[in-house]
Image (cartoon, rainbow, N blue to C red):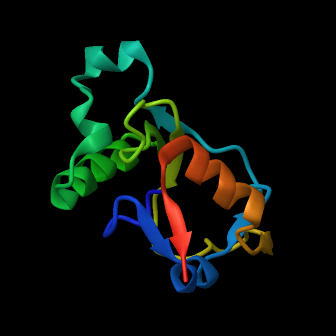
Amino acid sequence: MEVFRSSPNVVSTTEINKRRLTRLELPRALTAADCTAETARAWGITAEIHSSPDYVKTQEWAAAFAQSGFDGIYYFLRHDPAQRLTGIALFGPAGSPPGFPVGISEAIGPDLIQAVADRFGIRVVR
């Protein structure tokens, strides 16, 4: 849902076929700033951190977290209106960091496509 921002309810099979789901084991324990915790409010975190389209501001937040020693951020996904789905963004340059293992990569399957259609009303069309 987070990568298909241009159309709120229809995604082409071409766009689906460009994507892969990858699972990997991290080579070390990482520390993520948990911005979903109620106690994050004490640090000035509000729901804006989960929903801001201002990438300059979100990159500034990321830089502040990285400077404080965090490896990433744990947050609510912006495109889930129920705010139940969470994501993790790791800090650093794009791509796999050196030393990270190559993950298992697979196509987005019909079960996930159907689950997204049922839950969010997003359809995949040719």
Picture residue at 48% right of the left edge, 57% below the top? 122
Instruction: Report x, y in % for residue 118.
Output: 60, 45
Instruction: Report x, y in % for residue 88.
Output: 53, 47
Q: Nearer the viewer, residue 71 or 112?
A: 112
Picture residue at 26% right of the left edge, 46% below the top? 61
Q: Quadrant of the C terminus?
A: bottom right
Q: Is residue 13 left or right of residue 54?
A: right
Q: Is residue 81 left or right of residue 30?
A: left
Q: Is residue 39 left or right of residue 126?
A: left
| Visible residue check, residue 23 | no
| Residue 4 occupies quadrant | bottom left
Q: Nearer the viewer, residue 39 or 109?
A: 109
Instruction: Report x, y in % for residue 37.
Output: 44, 19
Q: Nearer the viewer, residue 50 or 15?
A: 15
| Residue 112 occupies quadrant | bottom right
Picture residue at 37% right of the left edge, 36% below the top? 81
